[in-house]
Amino acid sequence: MIKARVLKAPEIEKAPATLTEPQVDQVLEAARTARDRLLLTVLVEGGLRIGEALGLRREDMHLLPDSTHLGCRTRGAHLHVRPRQDNENGARAKAGRHRMVPVTQGAVHRYRDHLTEREQVTAAADCDYVFVNLVGGVMGRPMTYSNAKQVIERIGNRCGLRARPHMMRHTAATQWIRSGVAPDVVQTLLGHRSSASTAVYLHAQDDDLRAAVDRLAPEITR
């Protein structure tokens, strides 16, 4: 008889830090450029990793109701996360595989605002990356992780919040789960290979526990 060890997945002790809906509105309002508003939007509404966002090319943005003219059969506004090994800024798509992520009309409008803003940066004319530096010696070149992290941290500081790029992804996933989106759909949106990676967002919060008890508690009459 062969004895085998039973491997147990580590218990999730604490849900990841996220922003509330009012805080999301606050950081979007505090962004000072169309580029920064778009970056926050694809992170907090699309759940992208920062490396995935920084690796986006303009050809990945399919924002019309019908993209068949681009050779894409997916309907509605969406973007494509594509793993590339030659990104000038070192950005990486961690999952290493392609996925499609729907985007809201708000994101579409912010992308258009960003394109208008980019037109003022002559050095960005030949750059196919979505997110580029708008000022400084690297103006017109793709944003790096360090650039993006500093931008998001500064926006958070203006709001009196601790904001980090990955916190935006956590926020998107948590809001989907709390809104009743099926875990397998959330897993696909996030690009997780395993459901175990998505399980962290199923962690109940204090408000969830209170609501569950109150929902089933009998009414007390006096």
Image (spheres, rainbow, N blue to C red):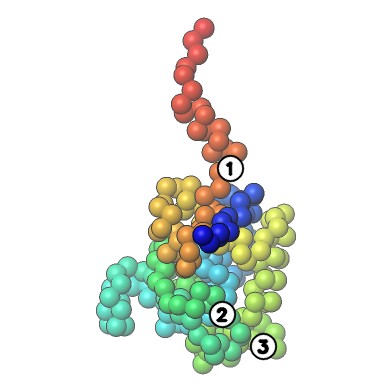
Q: Is residue 53 above or below residue 126?
A: above
Mark 1 Cα shell of 10 Å, populated few (<14), some (14-19), many (≥20): few
Mark 3 lies on a secondary structure that is loop
Foreground residue among 38 and 113? 38
Q: Which residue is mark 3?
A: 138
Mark 3 surroundings: few (<14), some (14-19) or many (≥20) residues within 10 A: few
Residue located beneath label 1 in the image:
205
When the figure is inspected, residue 26 is found, relative to residue 219, above or below; the finding is below
Q: Is residue 70 left or right of residue 155?
A: left
| Front position among marks 1 and 3 | 1
Percent of width and height locating residue 182 = 40, 52
Q: Earlier in the sequence, mark 1 or mark 2?
A: 2
Q: Nearer the viewer, residue 116 or 177?
A: 177
Per the rendering, the mark at residue 92 is 2
N-term mark: 1 or 3: 3
Q: CA distance from mark 3 to mark 2?
A: 20 Å
